[in-house]
Image: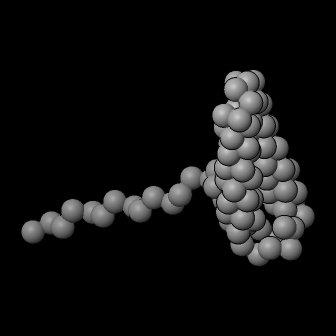
Amino acid sequence: MRSSKAPELPVILLEDFGALIGLAFALLGVGLMLITGNPIVDVLGSGSIGVLLVLIAAFLAVEMKLVRYLEPDIDHGSAHEPAERPQPREPSGH
């Protein structure tokens, strides 16, 4: 993850991985609820999806901040600097 030159690649991969694991949690929760008749299993499946999403978000936040810190050649201040505005032209005097 840290060696990737394109920062959006790890984000996309982790989001897709999280979606697949989340679908597995949902299938497992609903399937076990239908088999056992216990709705708590479905609640646990849904809760595990939420925990998974929080873990992925926290991991990405730490990794992206670490990548930005370790790459000194990137100018991080340009996003907060005002853009140069074009100077108004003088009206032509006919």
Q: Is residue 17 above or below residue 32?
A: below
Which quarter of the rendering shows the C terminus? bottom left
Count of residue discs:
0
Could one spot residue 24 in this view of the protein?
yes
Nearest the camera: 37 or 62?
37
The residue at 18%/67% (across/down) is 92
Q: Residue 31 placed where, x, y %?
A: 69, 41
Residue at horizontal 79 percent and vertical 53 percent from the top: 60
Give the colouring mode of the picture.
one colour
Q: Out of 30 and 45, give the one closest to the viewer.
A: 30
Decide which of 24, 75 is in the foreground and name it: 24
Single out the residue that lies furthest toward the left: 94
Measured from the top left, where is residue 68 in percent x and y?
Answer: 82, 60
Using the rendered image of the protein, determine whether residue 53 is visible from the camera's viewpoint. Answer: no
Residue at 72% x, 64% y: name it: 13
Instruction: Give left or right: position of 62 versus 25.
Output: right
The image quadrant that residue 90 belongs to is: bottom left
* Residue positioned 78% across, 43% down in the render: 52
Q: Is 89 displayed left or right of 24 in the figure? A: left
Q: Quadrant of residue 25?
A: top right
Q: Relative to 33, is 27 above or below? A: below
User: In the visual, does 27 lie left or right of 82?
Assistant: right
Q: Nearer the viewer, residue 69 or 93?
A: 69
Q: Position of residue 83 (x, y in %)?
A: 53, 57
Image height check: is 46 above or below 72? Answer: above
